[in-house]
Image (tube, rainbow, N blue to C red):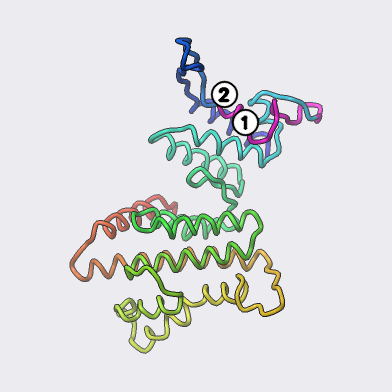
Amino acid sequence: MSDRLRRRLWMLLKEYDFSWNYQPDPNDRWIDTTSALQEVERELCRQYGEDRLVAFDDTNKRMPVDLERFSKGAYPAQVLDMVECFYGYLEGNNKPTFQQEINSIFEEENSPWRLTDGQFFKVDSKFLQMQVVARAHELLESKGYEGALEEFKEARNDLVSGDSKGAISNACKSLESAIKVILQKESGNASVLIRELNKIGFYSDIPEEIGQAFGDTVLMSLPFIRNKLGGHGQGGKVVNVPKHYAELAVHLAASLILFITQKSIELSLSKGKKEPKEERLQQKMETVEEDLPF
């Protein structure tokens, strides 16, 4: 993490900093003042189990520091902790604008990290992040897809933390949950759910003989990865899963979720009705597409 990136992050935090009054002792009328940055420093001390924050100084020695010096000399992961913690204190419209500015800084500084809903994710492919992962995330934020969104977040968290099997499993769960929302079903495994999509005419815009096999060959690719590498089908032998298979699963989940949610919108419109959920989805899809730089 470059010194320039650290400085820009700190300057942005100071720009968004705000203060408020509070009563330390409910039995005392004394009113004190604190700020978001002051609370971030206290919170990080609590998280790290330290009385003071510790970071490298100008002589490359670790020593107690204030939050500003911490932003300049802490480990990169700790700087990300600081930004995530600060995000938690923001309210209202400040959160999306702050997140947008944070991500612009990271992009301009050629850093692979992006902030999404107050959590940092490492972007290994800028194209996939902009064109697929971010768009799928936006669409899943619509009402009714909360479960699928939570599982998608878990898959991305697992990927960052190195839990390849967890990332694959949660990626597949997210796809299954999204299909359940479309079908308005509460249960069913992947193969059953994907075949149900064909029954409701999900692939009616392509030749029938292709549509019948589409789900089994395309949508079932992610469940296949899950069954073989995410925990099932291993027999007595434990399979060690390299990270790139987990990356494939998460990116594949994003692509398939993007496909089925957009198809769901098109089907609703073609039937001459627009449910509130589909209307919100379409608005999100149009907004995200307008924000893309290409």
The front one of 91 and 27 is: 27
Q: Residue furthest left?
A: 272
Q: Specify whether 182 is left or right of 24.
A: left
Q: Name the residue located 64 percent from the left edge and 26 percent from the top edge.
A: 67
Q: Is residue 291 above or below residue 70?
A: below
Q: Specify whether 99 is left or right of 143.
A: right
**Relative image position of residue 225 (x, y in whole percent):** 57, 74
Res 266 quadrant in image: bottom left
Q: Is residue 236 above or below residue 166?
A: below
**Relative image position of residue 104 (x, y in whole percent):** 51, 42
How far apart are the alpha carbons under marks 1 and 2?
A: 18 Å
> Quick one: SS at disc 1?
helix
Disc 1 versus disc 2: nearer the observer: 2
**Relative image position of residue 222 (x, y in whole percent):** 52, 73
Q: Specify whether 72 is left or right of 205.
A: right
Res 294 quadrant in image: bottom left
> Quick one: SS at disc 2?
helix
Q: Specify whether 190 is left or right of 201.
A: right
Kind of residue at badge 1:
Arg
Kind of residue at badge 2:
Gln
Number of residues whose C-alpha sits closer than 10 Å to that of mark 1, classed few (under 14), some (14–19) or many (20 or more): some
Which quarter shows the N terminus?
Answer: top right
Query: In the image, which residues are magenta?
Result: 39-61
Q: Residue furthest bottom?
A: 209
Q: Name the residue located 71 percent from the left edge and 32 percent from the top edge.
A: 73
Magenta stretch: includes residue 34: no
Residue at mark 1? 7
Q: Name the residue located 35 percent from the left edge and 76 percent from the top edge.
A: 197
In the rendering, which numbered label is found on residue 38? 2
- Which of the marked residues, 1 or 2, is nearer the chain's N terminus? 1
The front one of 279 and 108 is: 279
